[in-house]
């Protein structure tokens, strides 16, 4: 929107997406809120999905149409490199960074399979979370830092990955006005 339209429209804010890996389980959870300016326009958006015949889970923050374009591209990369999530993510990030059309997409992805997980961004980032003796966590979106802080605090407790995601997302929703408690949670 280089014609000045973007300056006149209120910004779309959306989402908290959190990935937690603990024990033999990885969980990605996302809230359902989409806001425009100070208005909630949808409370039950589905921002977490299964890909690659259920072998990969992914969540997005950012523009919905852009995220679905990236999901489709990632799915194609996963078909091209079956069982190689890291390679598929790197190849997508290369395309995203260099392709003129993809460069304009405004979204971020969190993706995971049973063994690895990554944050992908349009600037070419393919980041794997740092793990400690309790597990690992990553988050994106407007409430991501709140959810991540809560998850890190909960990791040493006797909670499984799904319960950590659910509690952390509730904490983020209590703090971030662009996050709600209508959660979609997927696990492997």
Image (tube, rainbow, N blue to C red):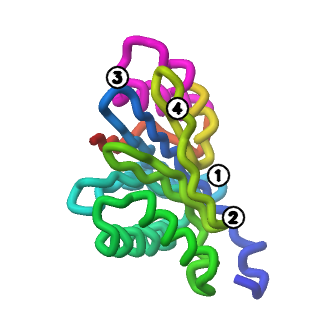
Image quadrant containing the C terminus? top left
Task: Please report contact status of discs 4 and 2: CB closer than 8 Å, yes or no.
Answer: no
Instruction: Give the class, few, some or many, for how many residues have Cα within 10 Å of label 1's Cα (few <14, many ≥20).
Output: few
Residue 136 percent across, percent down from the top left: 49, 32
Disc 2/disc 3 C-alpha distance (Å): 39 Å
Residue 23 percent across, percent down from the top left: 34, 26
Q: Indicate which label's residue lies in the foreground, 4 or 3.
A: 4
Task: Please report contact status of discs 2 and 3: CB closer than 8 Å, yes or no.
Answer: no
Task: Please report contact status of discs 1 and 2: CB closer than 8 Å, yes or no.
Answer: yes
Q: Where does label 2 land, which residue?
A: 10
Task: State the SS at label 3.
Answer: loop
Is 170 included in the stretch rendered in magenta?
yes
Question: Mark 3 or mark 1: which comes first in sequence?
Answer: 1
Numbered mark located on residue 122 in the image? none
Q: Indicate which label's residue lies in the foreground, 4 or 2.
A: 4
Tell me: 86 left or right of 14.
left
Q: Indicate which label's residue lies in the foreground, 4 or 1.
A: 4
Name the dominant secondary structure of the magenta segment. helix
Question: Mark 1 or mark 2: which comes first in sequence?
Answer: 2
Residue appearing at x 39%, y 58% in the figure: 85
Question: Mark 2 or mark 3: which comes first in sequence?
Answer: 2
Q: Which residues are magenta?
A: 151-175
Q: Where does label 3 land, which residue?
A: 160
Residue 158 percent across, percent down from the top left: 38, 12
Foreground residue among 31 and 87: 87
Disc 4/disc 3 C-alpha distance (Å): 16 Å
Question: Mark 4 or mark 2: which comes first in sequence?
Answer: 2
Q: Indicate which label's residue lies in the foreground, 3 or 1.
A: 3
Point out the residue furthest to the left here: 53
Question: Mark 4 or mark 3: which comes first in sequence?
Answer: 4
Q: Where does label 1 land, which residue?
A: 38
Task: Please report contact status of discs 3 and 1: CB closer than 8 Å, yes or no.
Answer: no
């Amino acid at each position: 929107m280089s014609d000045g339209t973007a300056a006149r429209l209120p910004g779309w804010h959306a989402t908290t997406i959190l990935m937690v890996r603990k024990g033999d389980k990885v969980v990605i959870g996302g809230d359902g809120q989409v806001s425009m300016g100070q208005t909630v326009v949808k409370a039950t958006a589905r921002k977490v999905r299964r890909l690659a015949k259920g072998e990969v889970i992914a969540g997005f923050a950012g523009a919905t149409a852009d995220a679905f374009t990236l999901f489709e591209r990632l799915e194609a990369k996963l078909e091209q490199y079956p069982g190689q999530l890291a390679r598929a993510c790197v190849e997508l990030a290369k395309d995203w960074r260099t392709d003129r059309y993809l460069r304009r997409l405004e979204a971020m992805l969190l993706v995971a399979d049973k063994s690895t997980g990554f944050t992908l961004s349009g600037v070419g980032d393919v980041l794997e979370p740092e793990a400690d003796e309790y597990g690992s966590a990553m988050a994106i979106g407007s409430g991501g830092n709140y959810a991540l802080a809560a998850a890190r605090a909960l990791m040493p407790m006797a909670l499984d990955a799904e319960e950590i995601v659910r509690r952390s997302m509730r904490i983020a929703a209590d703090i971030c006005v662009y996050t709600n408690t209508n959660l979609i949670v997927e696990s492997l």
